[in-house]
Image (tube, helix red, strand yellow):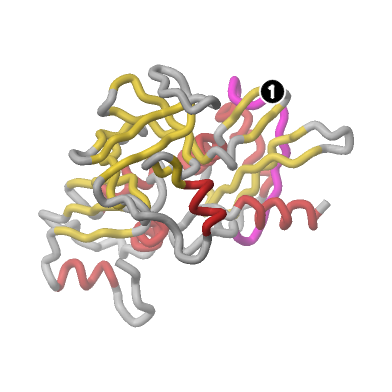
């Protein structure tokens, strides 16, 4: 569901007595942010989300104010639906889909992180007029979406993050979206983006970009951030920005965020 400017989505859900709706997480957040205080929660609404992970605080808000059930799914255009996701970040692989996590040598591994690869009857053959990308993303009947994950058994996948998003901080691998979820849940801010950029000595330093809520000041939030990140990050820098660059599906554009922050330096 993509919200049209002239349509009040919350009112439409009520007026049409909707029982099911599929939303991008970004649209869900916008919907929740614009609910009136007297909005009556529908009795039978089930929300399915696609395109990006749903932070815990957004899931809680949706179930408190809008839906009786929220189903988060993991899928790709190249494969279709792959997993239904649980609140703890684990997903149950759907029937007809085969998922493996492989190491750097392409060997399937259990109980340790690696690259996700997927196979199903609905897999596409490749990308039109783009043999280079096709060769990189499709190998031996498998599709490699660029995600990192972990599997304890053949039917359960835990997503860790995007392989190209993982931050390397002095040898420690950190998934930025985990930090973003913690800060979104613990801070009164509109949005969060986390990345890593090199300092003058060439060492990567975590940068936290916050979109402040209303009249709040960055200095007021800094004392709240340290307890949230204790044990997760040793060194980080915090800046306030007007907007976190995102794709239409709500995913953070890390390269654009990096360019924004470098321009501020």
Quadrant of image for the N terminus: bottom left
The relative height of residue 216 versus residue 84 in the rendered view (above or below) is below
Q: Nearer the viewer, residue 82 or 190?
A: 82
Count of labels in the image: 1
Q: Residue at x 53, y 25 (%)?
A: 105
- Residue 124 lies left or right of residue 127; in this view the side is left
Side of 137 relative to 23 (left or right): right
Q: Nearer the viewer, residue 154 or 208?
A: 154
The residue sitting at the bottom extreme is 6
Q: Which residue is pictured at 28% across the width and 35% down the height?
A: 98
- Single out the residue that lies furthest toward the top: 111
Residue 56: horizontal and vertical position, in percent? Answer: 38, 39
**Residue 233, located in which quarter of the rendered image?**
top right
Q: Identify the element where label 1 is drawn.
A: loop
The residue depicted at 67 percent of the width and 30 percent of the height is 168
Residue denoted by label 1: 171
Q: Position of residue 243 (x, y in %)?
A: 60, 60
Nearer-the-camera pick, 130 or 62: 130
Placement of 200 over or under 64, stated as above or below:
above
Splitting the image into 4 quarters, where does residue 144 fall?
Answer: top left
Depth check: give the residue in front, 111 or 102: 102
> Does the image show residue 88?
no
Q: Is residue 239 magenta?
A: yes
Residue 22 visible, this orientation = yes
Instruction: Give left or right: position of 179 versus 209.
Output: left
Q: Residue at x 37, y 30 (%)?
A: 100
Q: Where does the magenta region start and end?
A: 230-243
Magenta-span inclusion, residue 102: no
Where in the figure is residue 249, as x and y percent of width and height? 44, 59
- Secondary structure predominantly adopted by residues drawn in magenta: loop
* Left or right for 147, reference 123: right
Q: Percent position (x, y) of residue 9?
A: 28, 70
């Amino acid at each position: 569901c993509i919200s049209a400017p002239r349509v009040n989505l919350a009112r439409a859900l009520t007026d049409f007595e909707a029982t099911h709706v599929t939303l991008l997480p970004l649209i869900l957040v916008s919907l929740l942010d614009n609910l009136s205080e007297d909005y009556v929660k529908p009795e039978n609404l089930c929300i399915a989300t696609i395109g990006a992970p749903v932070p815990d605080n957004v899931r809680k808000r949706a179930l408190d104010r809008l839906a009786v059930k929220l189903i988060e799914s993991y899928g790709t255009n190249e494969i279709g639906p792959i997993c239904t996701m649980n609140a703890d970040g684990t997903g149950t692989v759907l029937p007809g889909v085969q998922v493996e996590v492989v190491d750097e040598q392409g060997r399937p591994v259990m109980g340790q992180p690696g690259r996700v690869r997927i196979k199903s009857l609905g897999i596409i053959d490749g990308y039109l007029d783009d043999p280079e990308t096709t060769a990189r993303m499709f190998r031996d009947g498998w599709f490699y979406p660029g995600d990192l994950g972990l599997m304890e058994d053949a039917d359960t996948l835990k997503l860790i993050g995007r392989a190209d998003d993982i931050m390397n901080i002095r040898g420690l691998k950190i998934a930025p979206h985990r930090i973003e979820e913690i800060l979104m849940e613990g801070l009164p801010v509109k949005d969060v983006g986390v990345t890593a950029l090199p300092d003058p000595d060439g060492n990567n330093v975590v940068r936290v970009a916050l979109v402040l809520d209303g009249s709040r000041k960055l200095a007021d939030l800094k004392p709240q951030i340290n307890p949230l990140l204790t044990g997760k990050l040793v060194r980080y820098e915090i800046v306030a920005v007007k907007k976190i660059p995102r794709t239409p599906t709500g995913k953070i554009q890390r390269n654009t965020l990096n360019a924004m922050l470098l321009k501020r330096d």
